[in-house]
Image: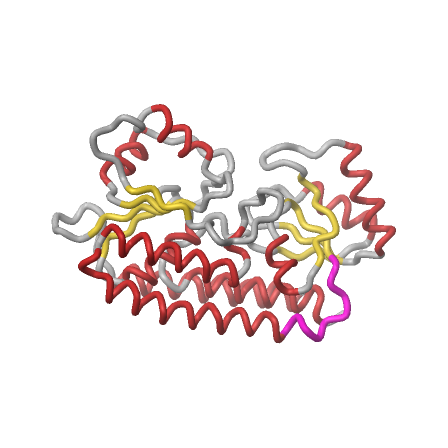
Amino acid sequence: MCLLLTACLSACQKTEYEFKKYESSKKDELPARDDKLRVLTTIAPLYSLTKNVTGDAAHVENLLPSGAGPHEYSLSPEDVMKIAQARVLIKNGVGLETWLDKLMAEQLAHAAEKPLIVDSSPAVEVIDNDPHIWLSPKNAVIQVKNIRDALVRADAGNKEVYTKNADKYIKHLEALDKEISGEVGSWKKREFVSFHSAFRYLARDYGLKQAAVIQEFPEKEPTPKHIADVINTIREKDIKVIFSEPRVSHKIVEAIARDLRLNVYSLDTLETGALYPEWYEVRMRANLEVLKMALGQR
């Protein structure tokens, strides 16, 4: 457990350092009065992917504030204003932003000017309408390509910049993909239980297995029957690892782990976080370190 805390602390310190370094070098973007494309993303992973494609050629801002989860978000009047002012709005898709879809259908459907809505999920092989597609770098590559194509459509004058930046960033993501594949390939134990169903794409693409989840539905407490079913699965499959998440209550996880003598680790769903270009890669590598300790050394 000490190794886990050391690794998590190291990853968090690196995240904070990279964020501060980026913040000190950038200016307040969206309010600037110039002709640059104004882009709005819904969640932190999309901000990171998009910023790597735009570089300094566009102003990029994220809609959800740090710490706000995307599953049950409620738009504020300020959010609606940001949406109205953006020329491009990049969303995750796969049903994650129902609150945005409702706004677009009810309030902005007949607006004279509205942003180009970009769904980052086309061509992703979706699992049971699970929206957590960004948790596999293989999917992130697809999302970057969709983002690139949309930016070129909206701002053809910067096609060369967006294309060049996207190509460069895709190479980074492909290196991350190979890094994860290389680590996981030698592991003997690959089954785990997670707090909620966020890691199915990561599991599918890298040969892991999410055997059960504690929280059946986002933002809802699991039923006693569901908890009993999870416990039965853990016992039947002799699972020794359970993944909790940052920013959620650990009471149920800790109770199950205590009763069944499981090791508890924290995996980040990346639903919210710091806003800087390297953030996605930093957090995915931090997750890989946690996975190595939880599964790779068994």
198 displayed left or right of 54 = right
Closest to the observer, 246 or 129: 129
Q: Image quadrant of residue 184?
A: bottom right
For the point 44% across and 52% down, the residue is 273
Q: Image quadrant of residue 219?
A: top right
93 displayed left or right of 34 = right
For the point 66% across and 57% down, the residue is 265
Task: Count the labels in the image.
Answer: 0
Snapshot colouring: secondary structure
Q: In what quadrant of the picture does the N terminus appear?
A: bottom right
Q: Position of residue 203 (x, y in %)?
A: 65, 58
Q: Given the current orientation, which residue lies at the most extreme top position?
A: 106
Q: Is 91 colored magenta in this rendering?
A: no
For the point 63% across and 53% down, the residue is 200
For the point 73% across and 47% down, the residue is 212
Closest to the observer, 3 or 279: 279
Whether 270 is drawn above or below 84: the answer is below
Q: Position of residue 270 (x, y in %)?
A: 50, 52
Q: Position of residue 140 (x, y in %)?
A: 47, 59
Closest to the observer, 242 or 128: 128
Q: Given the current orientation, which residue lies at the most extreme right position?
A: 236
Whether 289 is drawn above or below 29: the answer is below
Q: In what quadrant of the picture does the C terminus appear?
A: bottom right
Please tell me whether the stretch drawn in magenta is mainly helix, strand or loop: loop
- Which residues make up the magenta segment? 183-191
Q: Is 190 colored magenta in this rendering?
A: yes
